[in-house]
Image (cartoon, rainbow, N blue to C red):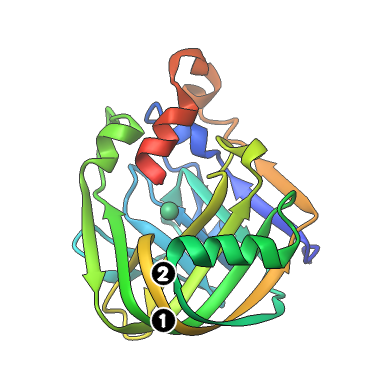
Amino acid sequence: MNNKNILYQHGTLALLVPGLLEGTITMGELFSHGDTGIGTGQGLDGELIMLDGVPYQIDSTGTVNLVKDDFTLPFATTHSASFNEFSDFNNLDMSSFEQTIIEKSNSQNTFFSVITKGEFSKMKTRAVAKSNKPYPTLVQTAKEQSIFESDRVSGTLLTYYSPEVFHGVAVGGCHSHFLADDHSIGGHVLDFQLEHGKSEIQVFDTLEQHLPINNSEYMNHNFDNDSIGSAIDEAEK
Ligand SMILES: [Zn+2]
């Protein structure tokens, strides 16, 4: 069994920047490291959210699909859910929500996850369209994204926080994916207005960083000229 305080990450956000988008772990394998998480598929095939051991993909048409065990991913973050009581929140936009959870968590120098179930008076998400080999860079692929908006939706917001010093390994700061209860909207979260919600928190003391050493393109790539930090800011924030 996994230690409950381990955050397991496969691949890095940085490897997506030059377009190293080959799927290098299967969903089945990922589930041996956790039951909750976020990620993307090979070729940036949509946005993934794993909740209670069930993996969902929001594709670029906005459809929510169940993900099979042999689906492969270049980048994913997962953990075994053991959330603790945190807080009820009312009337917060995305930036105040992020600021509030970081302050309230008292954990800004470590990794943590917050899961929020609630009603949103606004939700804006995106899902990237799958690309094929030769894979484009992250900034090019991010331009092929579809944007989805909802005025009133209830659902689950799954947020991962990484200290800024890990920007490149993950998104420094908060990174959230969303799934509506009725599956009408989901994906990588760009903006929201939380009307009311109940949040739980899980703080991690260990980052287990797994790298795709059997992928020769990753092993042979030279990251020196990829401007990782600014490319991630452009594509992910
Ligand atoms: Zn995302």
The location of residue 162, given as percent across then percent down, is 63, 49
The answer to whether residue 146 is above or below residue 216 is below
Residue type, numbered disc 1: Gly
- The reply to whether residue 32 is visible in this rendering is no
CA–CA distance in space, label 1 to label 2: 7 Å
Q: How many marks?
A: 2
The residue shown at (33%, 42%) is 43
Residue 74 versus residue 26: which sits nearer the camera?
74
Residue type, numbered disc 2: Phe
Residue 9 versus residue 199: which sits nearer the camera?
199
Left or right: where does residue 22 sit relative to residue 59? right
Quadrant in which the N terminus is drawn: bottom right
Marks 1/2 in contact by CB < 8 Å: the verdict is yes
The location of residue 58, given as percent across then percent down, is 32, 64
Badge 1, how many Cα within 10 Å: few under 14, some, many 20+? many
Q: Earlier in the sequence, mark 1 or mark 2?
A: 1
Residue 20 numbered mark, or none: none
The residue shown at (43%, 29%) is 230
Q: Which residue is mark 2?
A: 178
For label 2, the SS is: strand
The answer to whether residue 223 is above or below residue 103 is above
Residue 155 numbered mark, or none: 1
The location of residue 53, given as percent across then percent down, is 55, 74
- The reply to whether residue 199 is visible in this rendering is yes
The residue shown at (60%, 66%) is 100
Asked whether mark 1 and ligand 1 are closer than 8 Å, the reply comes as: no
The location of residue 113, given as percent across then percent down, is 63, 64
Left or right: where does residue 136 sit relative to residue 115? left
Badge 2, how many Cα within 10 Å: few under 14, some, many 20+? many
Residue 37 versus residue 205: which sits nearer the camera?
205
